[in-house]
Amino acid sequence: MAPLKALELAYPIFDSNFQTFCASHGILSVEDFLIHDVYELAAFADQQPTSEKLKQGITQIFSIIDAQHQPWLNGLELLDDALQKKHVFSTGCEGIDLLLGGGLRAGQLTELVGPSSSGKTQVCLLAASYLVSKNMGTVVYLDTGNSFSSQRIAQFVGRISNCMFDQAGQRIFQKVMNNILCYSVFDIFSMFNVLHRLEINLQSQKGEQVRLLIIDSISSLITPIIGNSGSQGRALMASAGYLLKKLAQEHNLVVLVTNHTVGGERGIPKPALGQTWKSVPHVRLLLSGDHGNNIRSISVLKHPSMASGKVASFTI
Amino acid sequence: MAAKGWINGDESAAEMLARVSKERPFLLLPPLHRVPLRVGNVVELVGPSSSAKTQILIQAAVNCILPTEWNGVHYGGLERLVMFIDLDCRFDILRLSEMLKHRIMEPIGSMCNYEELYAVCMRRFLYVRCYDSLEFLATLKTLHHRLQKETKVLHVEIQLLMIDRKCISLQSISDTVVQEIRKLLLVHPMLVIATKEIMLGKVYAVDEAKQNKYLLEASDVRSITSSIQRLPYREFMPSVWQFREHGMQSPPYFMNSHGARNKCLPVLWSWIDLGCAKPPRSLNWKIAVGCLE
């Protein structure tokens, strides 16, 4: 939030007199206004010789503050937004789609949890391939462990769209493959970089075709920064969660992240990242699989409108 | 003269009772209707994750926006505004809409000719999402003006302010949030319900030593005495959230002792602290949280 000095150009009411008055109460920015008691400030302004102008300034600040928060919506507007803009996107995997009642919902943060080799990355790759093959938009893929495989994507795309490997088929294939943007990120700061750039692009409608954001895996970015000492790591984790949810909600994206498991009570594996992260995703799905066969099972750990515990199996 | 007036007092007990029960009547708001709540109270719903906290908020909201009666059909609602501040960004409007439709259809069997009622009720539900603490503060600061505007348009008063999931933030911010809520309550008499997630003691039962360490470190460990068991839990929020230090009416606390893994099971809720009100006869009760399907 801007310091008052910077606002002087846009709003001439914040002249030097107003700034000195505010500074004498310890207010230098709009943020300070939020923390201060504005009614008390107005009472102080009354005692000043230029109270009229000061009060106008305070009213002006109120209208700036009013623009700082998301707009109030009534139930009908909210429902309209949910029905018109929060579409459901198929993952390309029948078992998962049936379990989730259609697939992944825009505006929600879906988390895939599972031990290694339980098929998390495969589900991500398949969801990305399916979305671009059906020309539903583009995909932003954040890869943290060099596990992104373009060959696997090519296989999936070939299978979904029955591409012929002739000249015309190649061209379609290339167009589809161009719609998946993969970024290699190896720490949380470069992830914030990519996400902030994405947010700016989305706001300026340059990247409005983006429909799916995948982070595989988010836990390998967050685990190194949360230790026993200090709370900065937790703060970063919380702000990452809010940023992802904001992107999903404001720009109607499907956000898909993966998380690994750690040993919990009595050796039963539980999702990593602990209690604070637990409240971040809307949907949490547990993947598990046997070694030796291709059948994986998926169960709902958490869903906003579904009882947890439902299980389905699928193959990729 | 002034002294004599002071000795005579302002009003008798009977007058005061009549005035208070008129100004701040009891709110019988299912599923919290077993609890003597009034406008001006701050209620905190405390429970571990997936213990139907948001579900209770939605049920209460539906009861608040429904009218008492519509075309001769009795609904028993309050016909008031509800404001929902979502700090968690996890609220699902479809759930509220389904539940409202279900409630409207229950006595009459079909939805025909009731779209109007549905739309009126949905308009009484106001929602805002906050992505960080400063947005939350900005929302609270401008809530008074917003409320005046809405009241003029819809001709109904607000009765219920809901805050889903209070988040951890800086001390100065939480101080101001508490003050803002207090000021709002002075101008707009309403019931505030806030939810809060806690970790129950059993979460730490992984190993005893670790648990003891945690409990010693946590500065404000509180022990809840309910009629059946003592549950230690760790307070996430700074002490300023426990409004009573600020001379505010102390909030009745609720908590449930079992997380509902399966959403069809009833959840057991119990009192923690009831402030000045007289506790009801039974301290625990069950709230059935049915699935909509």
Image: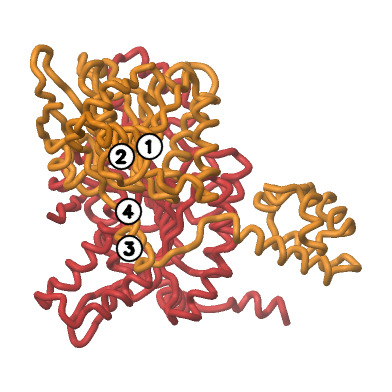
Q: Which chain hosts label 3?
A: A
Q: Which mark is residue A79?
A: 3
Colour approach in the figure: by chain
- Measured Cα–Cα span from mark 3 to mark 1: 31 Å
- Tag 4: residue type? Lys
- In depth, the one of A119 and B86 nearer the eye is A119
Left or right: B266 with respect to A1?
left
The residue wearing badge 4 is A86
- Measured Cα–Cα span from mark 1 to mark 2: 6 Å
Is label 4 in a helix, a strand or a loop?
loop
Label 4 Cα crowd, 10 Å radius (few <14 / some 14-19 / many 20+): many
Label 3 Cα crowd, 10 Å radius (few <14 / some 14-19 / many 20+): some
The quarter in which the C terminus of chain B is drawn is bottom left
Decide: is B217 above or below A205. Answer: above
> Chain B drawn in what color?
red
The residue wearing badge 1 is A179
- Tag 1: residue type? Asn
